[in-house]
């Protein structure tokens, strides 16, 4: 979680199952985007996952958030597929994968 002046400005949430993790959510408040907050959050999360012996990380991005894909690519994530109706009917997900 990223906090500034007692206010939450960003957070990341990942679920772990054995050596695999899924980044379920990652968001930075609109007025704080583009300032390196998201990069810091995801870098720290990936470091924590590595320490927990996670070796494979997936990220599921809502199709409307596809503009965030280049952000994930900066960390080495690659698109491996999509899942129709993943977030509910009509809400498809783009699936990205990173080997740690
Ligand atoms: C995607 C998101 C988490 C990125 O966080 P951020 O704090 O804005 O990103 P940063 O400032 O840390 O950017 C890190 C790098 O990624 C790049 N980047 C970030 N968002 C990008 C975008 N939409 N398109 C292209 N590049 C992007 C930045 O240019 C930066 O690269 P640089 O260091 O070469 O300049 C944030 O924009 C967000 O919350 N978006 C809305 C929710 C969302 O789409 N979440 C992801 C899906 S779960």
Image (cartoon, grey):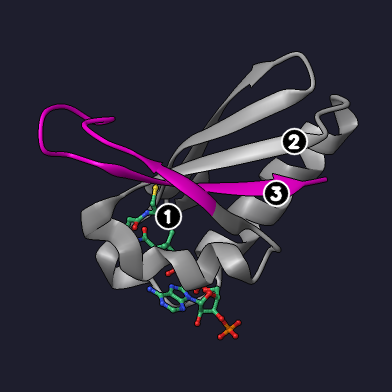
Residue 90 sits inside the magenta stretch:
yes
Of marks 1 and 2, the one in the foreground: 2
Residue 6 visible? The answer is no
Q: Quadrant of ligand 1?
A: bottom left
Q: Which residue is mark 1?
A: 5
Residue 91 sits inside the magenta stretch:
yes
Secondary structure at badge 1 equals: loop
Q: Is residue 13 left or right of residue 6?
A: right
* Disc 3 CB within 8 Å of nearest ligand 1 atom: no
Mark 1 packing: few (<14 Cα in 10 Å), some, or many (20+)?
A: few
Considering only vertical position in the picture, is 89 above or below 62? above
Figure quadrant of residue 36: bottom right
State the extent of the magenta-drawn residues as a range: 80-100
Q: Please state the horizontal and vertical placement of residue 39, each as a whole percent of the image.
A: 60, 64
Q: Which residue is mark 3?
A: 98
Please tell me which residue lies in front, 5 or 17. Answer: 17
Q: Please state the horizontal and vertical placement of residue 75, each as a whole percent of the image.
A: 68, 63
Residue under the image location 63 percent in, 47 percent down = 97
Please tell me which residue lies in front, 30 or 50. Answer: 50
How far apart are labels 3 and 1 at the CA level?
Answer: 33 Å
């Amino acid at each position: 979680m990223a906090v500034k002046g007692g206010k939450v400005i960003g957070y990341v949430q990942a679920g772990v199952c054995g050596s695999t993790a899924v980044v379920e959510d990652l968001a930075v408040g609109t007025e704080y985007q583009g300032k390196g907050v998201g990069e810091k959050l995801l870098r720290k999360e990936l470091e924590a996952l590595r320490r927990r012996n996670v070796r494979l990380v997936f990220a599921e991005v809502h199709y409307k958030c596809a503009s965030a894909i280049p952000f994930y690519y900066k960390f080495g994530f690659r698109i491996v597929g999509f899942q129709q109706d993943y977030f509910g009917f009509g809400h498809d997900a783009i699936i990205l994968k990173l080997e740690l």
